Amino acid sequence: MRVFIGLIIAALLVATPALAQPRIGAGRSVEEISIAELQAEMAAGRTTSERITRAYLARIDAIDRRGPVLRSVIAVNPDALAQARALDAERRAGRVRGPLHGVPILIKDNIETLDPVATTAGSLALKDNVTGRDAPVVARLRAAGAVILGKTNLSEWANIRGSGSISGWSAINGRTRNPYALDRNPCGSSSGSGAATAASLAAAAVGTETDGSIVCPSSANGIVGIKPTVGLVSRTHIVPISASQDTAGPMARSVADAAALLTAMAGTDAADAATVEADARKSDYLAALDVNALQGRRIGVARFLAGWHAPTDALFNEAINALRAGGAEIVEIAEGPPRAEISAAEFTVLLTELKVGLNAYLASTSPDRVAVRTLADVIAFNKTEPRELALFGQETFERAEATKGLDDPDYVAAAAKAKRLAGAEGIDALMARHRLDAIVAPTGSPAWVTDTLLGDRFIGGSSSLAAVSGYPNITVPMGHVRGLPVGLSFFGAAWSEAKLIGIAYAYEQRTKARRAPLYLPSLLE
């Protein structure tokens, strides 16, 4: 009976208000529709980008603001409908820019757009940071025909302010809720991008990752996330944490949709030295989609990155069986590189690079709009703004402020050690020793109950090796634990996105593990 009542409640939440299911024409809703299907509808003349954009805006209003109240979208773009109309006019004139033409996309709110909305990183210190400039990654999406629908909520300052942080919470927009169970956490820091994509508030979204911030919210919200090789995608005009590890990446409901975004996002940016190889390394990632891509592949099973949650391990074993059934050769890996050493070195790197990078970013903003010009200014601002420190502190910021810069011998040693242990002696060594095409592991734990007193309760994950090495990581829905999604991560050598996308797509098509969220108030006991 309790299950039956729960399903009734969930159905009511989804069905009300009526705008939760806006139509784009021919009786079709935007819920769970793919980018390819949106293109087919527009190409056939059955709908327009303007109608699609209106439908997503209505769904944001119904579900994010008035229905279950996900709080996943910080701001909608007031120019979105004008952009959609202009792209419709181009289509009528015979110009279609590609797979994203007329497709509405959400952008994490630490990434600048030239639209009249602020880029806040979730902080009240940046509430007026309307820059009037596109981050190159946004400019590429815009040039590919995407409609910039709005900005998504995030863990404030991308979860780097304090050790007691609450993933998905920002002073600007409050707490993002997980659409699978509203009392559960969406993980972070790309929390809003994950929840909004899962809830079909846009065709897809862009997130950013330093360590886990794309793949964890993708896993917790039952979607696909791609953390690219550092340097494939520009970081210019993105509020930074670490020049060594930061990257933007796509978050979508399918591998195909994520591949379409990554194709548009990738490329060299003269202002970001890390991207010097990007133009030579990028490809059409949609061309990598192959249902037979598992055949003959050697897949390493990273047992050393599992074992922290029995129900997730059970799904992991089912995923391994599916990979084997798809023609992959499975190679068990019991031991990996020293994670505690990697983590310690990584933290030193993040603290030092945070101060350097954030000071440089703040110096590039308008002093008429942004009063804080340095990390020290942000720390001082937070002490005067009650909402900022009401739930957790800023001790990580304070430790970063005490660092000594990129010439500090401790930083230089830590940076070299982290890259060596995670890269050359980590992923590279495992791939060579076992002759692997990819390594798999559970992405993360099922979503925990959000606790504003005790903070996050994350119990396990596999993001750090790919994050610290700067190598690609793709998470795909693996199944559900009592209704909560968990993901399977595929990671491998630098610049191996196309290979990993093919493998991930073949796994996705074989298992079809994704289910749309039900917006349950809570999990039933």
Image: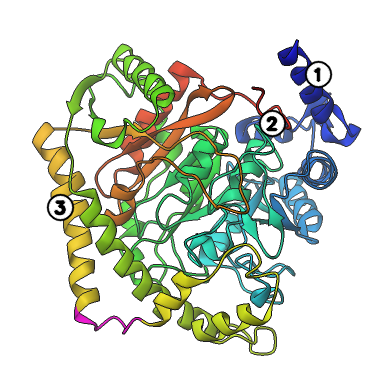
Q: Which mark is residue 424?
A: 3
Q: What residue sits right under mark 2 in the picture?
A: 522
Side of 216 relative to 112 (left or right): left
Kindly state the secondary structure of the residue where label 1 is placed.
helix
Q: Which residue lies furthest to the bottom in this view?
A: 367
Inter-mark Cα distance, 2 to 1 = 13 Å
Give the quarter of the figure containing the N terminus.
top right
Expressed as whole percent of the image width and height from the top left, the position of residue 3 reads 71, 14
CB atoms at circles 3 and 1 under 8 Å apart? no
Side of 378 relative to 397 (left or right): right
Kindly state the secondary structure of the residue where label 2 is placed.
loop
* Disc 2: CA contacts within 10 A as few (<14), some (14-19) or many (>=20): some
* Camera-nearest label, 3 or 2: 2
Expressed as whole percent of the image width and height from the top left, the position of residue 333 reads 18, 30
Most frequent secondary structure within the magenta stretch: loop
Residue at figure coordinates x 54%, y 46% from the top left: 187
Res. 409 visible in picture = yes
Amino acid found under the numbered disc labelled 2: Ser
Expressed as whole percent of the image width and height from the top left, the position of residue 28 reads 79, 26
Side of 279 relative to 392 (left or right): left
* Disc 3: CA contacts within 10 A as few (<14), some (14-19) or many (>=20): some
Inter-mark Cα distance, 3 to 2 = 44 Å
* Disc 1: CA contacts within 10 A as few (<14), some (14-19) or many (>=20): few
Task: Name the N-terminal-most of marks 3 and 1.
Answer: 1
**How many numbered markers are drawn?**
3
CB atoms at circles 3 and 2 under 8 Å apart? no
- The residue closer to the viewer here, 130 or 85, is 130
Amino acid found under the numbered disc labelled 1: Ile
Which region of the structure is painted magenta?
403-409
Expressed as whole percent of the image width and height from the top left, the position of residue 354 reads 41, 73
Q: What residue sits right under mark 1 in the picture?
A: 8
